[in-house]
Amino acid sequence: ALQGGCVIVCVCVWVWCVCFTLTAYTHYYNPLFVFVPCAGAGGWSPLVSDRYQWLEVDLGRRTQITAVATQGRYGSSDWLTAYLLMFSDTGHNWRQHRQEDSLGAFPGNSNADTVVQYKLEQPVIARFLRLIPLDWNPSGRIGLRLEIYGCRYTSSVASFDGSRSSLVYRLSVRASWTVMETISLKFKTLKNSGTLLHAEGQQDHSLTLVLEKGKLLLYHLQGVSSSSGGQLLVSLGSLLDDQHWHHVKLERLSTHLNLTVDKNTLQVQIPADLSHWHIHTVRGNTQTHTHILKQTCQKRIHSCRNIHLFSSGNVTFSCAEPVSVAVTFTDSHSFLQLPGLTSWSTGLVSVTLQFRTWNKGGLLLTFGLPQQDGTVFLYLSQARLRLQISKAGRSSLDLSAGSGLNDGQWHYVELKNLSLNFCIDIMWNHLDNLKVQPLDFFPFSGCPTGESAQKCKNPFNTFQGCMRLLNLDDQTVDLIKVQQRLLGNYSHLQIDMCGIIDRCSPSHCEHGGICTQSWSTFHCNCSNSGYRGATCHSSIYEQSCEAYKHKGNMSGHYYIDVDGSGPIKPQLIYCNMTEDKTWMVIQHNNTELTRVQSSAERNQHFAYFDYSSEEEQLVAVISQSEHCEQELSYHCRKSRLSNTLGNIWRNSCYQTSWGGALTGTQQCGCSLQDSCLDPSHDCNCDADYDQWTEDSGLLTHKETLPVRSLVLGDIHRPGSEAAYRVGPLRCHGDKNFWNAAFFDKETSYLHFPTFQGELNADISFLFKTTSSSGVFLENLGIKDFIRIELSSSMEVVFSFDVGNGPLDVRVKTSLPLNDSRWHRVQAERNVKEASLRVDNFPAATHEAPTDGLMHLQLNSQLFIGTASRQKGFLGCIRSLQLNGITLDLEKRAKITPGVLPGCPGHCSSYGSLCQNEGRCEEKANGFSCDCGQSAYTGAFCHKEVSATFKSTTSITYILKEPFELSRNSSGLPSSIYSDITLRGENISLSFSTNQSPALLLYVSSFYREYLILLINKNGEDSQIAFSLGCLLLINDCVFLILQPIFSSHCSLVVHCRQSRGFIYLPPFPSPCCVFLPLDSEPDGLDAEMAELASLGFTGCLSGVHFNSISPLKAALLHPDSPVIVTSPLVQSSCGSSSPANTYAAETTHSLSGTGSKVSLCMLRVIAVVIFVTLSALAVMARFICSRKETYRNQEVKAAQPEDSNEFPFSGQPDSPSAPSENQKEYFI
């Protein structure tokens, strides 16, 4: 029969030609009845069922093995449920076959009769096969029938002794250049360094393949013959010095080189010198055994090229296999115990060994010193080799040598006469007076359990790694006897193989993450990479300025990762959020107006522009943006644009149109507006006037952006002058961020192609719903699947199965998620772990098994919602991204019943971003903040409107008279409203001044009542006394506003209302005018206030708000408002250092460095203590004196005069501050 081009050999038919080795088996089971096709009863069943049994098959010669099949023992309950496969060419130095470079176990049988076949992903070439049982039927024992599929393999070999021996292949001269050349070979070696291949071509160019520390390095050389003078192109592979065959393939294509080592391939851009280069000589010059080199047929060549073969040095065409038996210490329970030697009675100890490991620590060996009552430990610590000799009653002696010994390389250790020689030529001094007596055991790595454990102590970690060439007193330890239980004792070992795995080759760390490893796992260092997660897969940056804005960020420079977890690097971009639209601004090296001098020697001027972002970053930004533009202007004087203009953009295409015109029209913007200076020309500059003019406009066609270069002509004529300017690239709108779909039925779903996320999968989206459960998405395979669902109103579940069994990652929230607000879900699964994030709640993670299956194999469509019987999703899903790629939900929703494109209602989630009474307004894609009723401006009504006032500057805002009052101009006194509940006045502003006293704001009413905000001179004293801030006077109410003593600004928030039991400023029935400050002396002011008003105000005012009126904002930004301004008023940034939210009573701005925060905290603590104490005393005093207060108030009420306009604090500097006789109760 044929199996993939190979003959299927039934080994049982030629059983006399096959040698096999078995561990001990029961006498009543014939070992010949092992193989599946054989008729009759039987099968292999060892005498003892444990994990130290194996079945070994000798195929007689090297064979290409493609598959194996297993079956249980005939007519019994004996079958395997899991097993390992080992392969070897010599019967020693076994190599474990692994699936997916991780999982070593193969699934077995579920009964004794069914045949389970496993096809190897890549055929294995070997002579010997060994099957090691791992698990079996718990109600039976180990039982097996086995079949092997494959075909014979024949290949010539050449062996090199490590000297200057080589094979030289000279190829016939090629008639023409070819697109592709290929060299392939296989090699095996015990040496970790050597030159493997040297290929020469014309012009002294050559490629050299070098083995260095078990890795393959490809160098490009020119005019040199050694790798030291060449350029390193690529490095691939690891641990290639394991004496196993490794496949190497080198392909030269027209633009790049492919290097393949075993199953891994790397591509490197070819140097320009090699783009039209071909090989004429191939030299095998190495310390390794290698297959004969093969030159394949090339494209455009109709026959194979003639090859001339030469050899030099000691080259043999056979492969002698040195026998080297290694032992692997697999886990923390591993140990090897060898008996002591009688020769040690002389006091001499000689131990040599080689080891390799990834761990920084672990015990290599230990033995006792009975006469000295001491112990010797040889161990690794912090990747250094250490020798510790401890004696009872004395401090231990510690010596160390080497560094970085956890690099996976073989290291040689010699301990002789208790002198330690290390492979890096470090020797420890001879230790006198220490003699070793005969021992009954000699432990390596760890200590056994049972009686022997009492004599063995291991205060260190167990060694995990490989050892070989163990010698005790120059006698090699026969590890095969150890394996057969004829010598010593051991546990949890793999003998006759080194099972070290390089988990960092190839590295699973993405985006430049640095991979480090231990024996059982690896770790990715994502520092400074811009990514996070166990494999540095997910970006820590947002994908657009739009996303940053909706997190509440202001304008500034931000890192933008356009494709999230994709290959494009993050880029630093300026985000301009001052306008309604959010702009991404990408600068280049020349955005200024640049003058071009005329020159008779040249008729063209070339300008090139280098952008701060790379080409792929620019393309991605432009592609995802809704709109992009770039300003282009040309100032000219006798310098025409027609037939001489052009600009080159990203794809190196040439364009002959200017900014503001349609692409490819050879026009300027003025031609579309019919505004060109000369109607007969399409550009102003084409009029060729001897005067300065310009052609300016925006390039908005995204396919023509960005501008890479300019070519300007007509600059060589006498008198020609020109200047140009190319502005930065500006883009707004994020098509991915707002891409949404609304599922109005639980049975609704969208379908997309199968999700490709075998090793790394990240899924992110936003959702909002009123339903308590539903499936967001799912993708199924034969056994594997992936699913994200809302399991309850406060729990999201990420479920998946990659073949290791279903796993759930759950995040439980403290707040309900079905509140019709947007919530963000981020799920990631990689070879290390699975994680789930919901909003800002703590993330949940689940580690992957160390040697489990890694590949997620899906084959169905990806469903958004669910097409299965589970409950579907009811609500909105937005910005759904899989591995950085956004799914176009809106496009698919337009053609899918039950799903609507888009999803309105964003203010419920983002409305809180609108500050300072800004009002959120809904938009189709997002929202905006209406700052019309706020004293602030900006995207979030966060930017203070401030101006610097001089003593002669004032603002008057005139309010309209209410209709009810206009009918009766006489009005009524405010006292008639005393029994009517009226709203209070809300006033807020920030100020900075050195003036005292000063009037800040004056409000008058139609009833000739007024409200005044002023800074009294005594406020300065109060600030020093209380260290709290500014003392303010409003009518006859005193307000003390909390403010850090180190700040230069006072934030004022006044909310006056009537409240029972307290005296507050009564509300204005009808305010008339608002003054900032007073521009004249209104009628009705007393002499003190009139004098204060005449002083004016000198300083800074910002964020002025009176109820719904913003006088300062109206004067600066809306001159058509009913505002009167005296003397010029210019907007400034003088209020920028005040707190953004003026409703906050405190701020952390400091003018005295970092110490101010500490002082402020101390003052706050002191203030709280004082406040609590005084409050308690006030309550007690109030209770005791309640009767007295009542009597006194009645007495005062009988003789109370009319209210006066006197203030308890005088505006005069020298006037004393005397309280009135009639004390009032104030709420501060």
Image: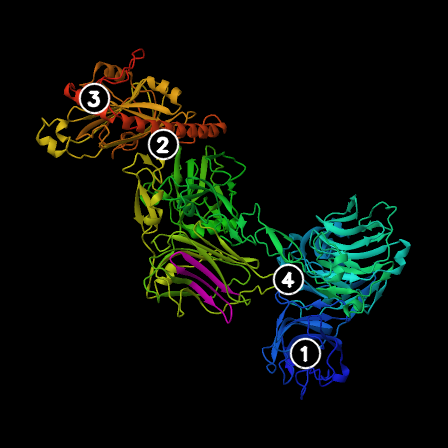
Q: Earlier in the sequence, mark 2 or mark 1?
A: 1
Question: Magenta-highlighted stretch: main secondary structure?
Answer: strand
Mark 4, mark 1: which one is toward the viewer? 1
Mark 2 in CB contact with mark 3 (< 8 angstroms):
no
Name the residue that disc number 1 marks: 148
Check the image and name the residue furthest to the right.
346
Name the residue that disc number 3 marks: 1192
Q: Residues within 10 Å of mark 2 (few under 14, many from 20)?
A: some
Q: Earlier in the sequence, mark 2 or mark 4?
A: 4
The local secondary structure at tag 3 comes to: helix
Residue found 50% across the figure and 29% down from its top:
1154
Q: CA distance from mark 4 to mark 3?
A: 97 Å
Mark 1, mark 3: which one is toward the viewer? 3
**Hey, what amino acid is under mark 1?**
Ile
Q: Give the magenta part as a residue range.
A: 777-801
The local secondary structure at tag 4 comes to: strand
Name the residue that disc number 2 marks: 1145
Mark 4 in CB contact with mark 3 (< 8 angstroms):
no
Residue 884: horizontal and vertical position, in percent?
Answer: 48, 55
Q: CA distance from mark 2 to mark 3?
A: 36 Å
Mark 2 in CB contact with mark 4 (< 8 angstroms):
no
Splitting the image into 4 quarters, where does residue 1191 fall? top left
Q: Residues within 10 Å of mark 4 (few under 14, many from 20)?
A: few
Mark 2, mark 4: which one is toward the viewer? 2
Q: CA distance from mark 2 to mark 1?
A: 82 Å
- Residue 281 shows in the view: no
The local secondary structure at tag 2 comes to: loop
Q: Earlier in the sequence, mark 4 or mark 1?
A: 1
